[in-house]
């Protein structure tokens, strides 16, 4: 079974997508990632899509689902590295990825996750 | 041109190899990684090969070259996620990857890089 590796980096999980996603693959990723969040007790998920040239509406929607699932498992998801052409297509498809935070690259996404984690730990409540 | 993405993570570069390497691809990686080390002034390189089922002698040797090149550019390379079968094959091929540090997973590799960086900074030189 084709699979996208999920790397553990401290409190976070990093998913670097390097092949064009098809429907089955992104559903596998959804299952895999949620079970990894549970197993590793990760607090954040970073999904790098800089290698993706195409994100269709199914994949966009599934990424939204992944973020929503991560949220109920108490992990924040940040999508990074989106190409301008992908952003254009997504908005033209009517998808604004409302539930997902985004950042320009892995570095900035990691900083965003750290800030989100500090903020939620500071108030004593999870986001 | 097929390419393996190189992600910047703070002071480090992360290379997560997810496709089986062929000779041209690993040579591209070598060029790409050395130029990224120069551009980003990275101090460490983490190469994750957990998805690789086969590492032949050419690839093993080239990984050694990459680590040596990174070293002269003042970056430490750590190879992580090697499968037991790959370790067996490499040693049977007579390659013990002497010049490369290894760690079991990305988390441990990152910790090793941080320690190496702290140790070298401890001598009075800043990065």
Image (spheres, coloured by chain):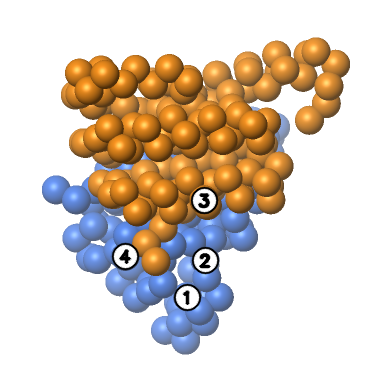
Chain colours: A blue, B orange
Q: CA distance from mark 4 to mark 3?
A: 24 Å
Name which quarter of the figure residue A35 lies in: top left
Label 1, label 2: how far apart the Cα atoms are: 6 Å
Instruction: Give me the C-alpha separation between circle 1 and circle 4.
Output: 13 Å
Instruction: Write the residue at 59% across / 55% down.
Output: A105
* Residue, disc 4: A20
Name the residue beneath numbered marker 3.
B31
The correct choice, above or below, for A123 with respect to A89 in the image is above
Q: Which residue is mark 2?
A: A82
Q: Is residue A47 above or below residue B127?
A: below
Residue A30 appears left or right of A102: left
SS of the residue at dot 3?
A: helix
Q: Considering only order in the chain, which callout, 4 or 1, is on the residue closer to the N terminus? A: 4
Label 1 vs label 3: CA separation?
28 Å
Alpha-carbon span between mark 4 and mark 2: 13 Å
Marks 2 and 1: in contact by CB < 8 Å?
yes
The correct choice, above or below, for A122 with respect to A63 in the image is above
Residue hosting label 1: A86
Mark 2 or mark 3, whichever is nearer to me: 3
């Amino acid at each position: 079974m084709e699979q996208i590796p999920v790397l553990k980096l401290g409190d976070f999980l990093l998913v670097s997508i390097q092949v064009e996603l098809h429907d089955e693959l992104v559903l596998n990723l959804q299952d895999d990632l949620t079970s990894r969040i549970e197993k590793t007790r990760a607090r954040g998920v970073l999904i790098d899509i800089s290698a993706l040239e195409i994100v269709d509406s199914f994949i966009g929607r599934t990424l939204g689902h992944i973020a929503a699932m991560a949220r109920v498992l108490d992990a924040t998801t940040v999508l990074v590295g989106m190409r301008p052409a992908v952003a254009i297509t997504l908005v033209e498809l009517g998808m604004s990825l409302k539930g997902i935070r985004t950042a320009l690259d892995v570095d900035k996404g990691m900083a965003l996750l750290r800030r989100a984690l500090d903020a939620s730990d500071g108030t004593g409540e999870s986001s």
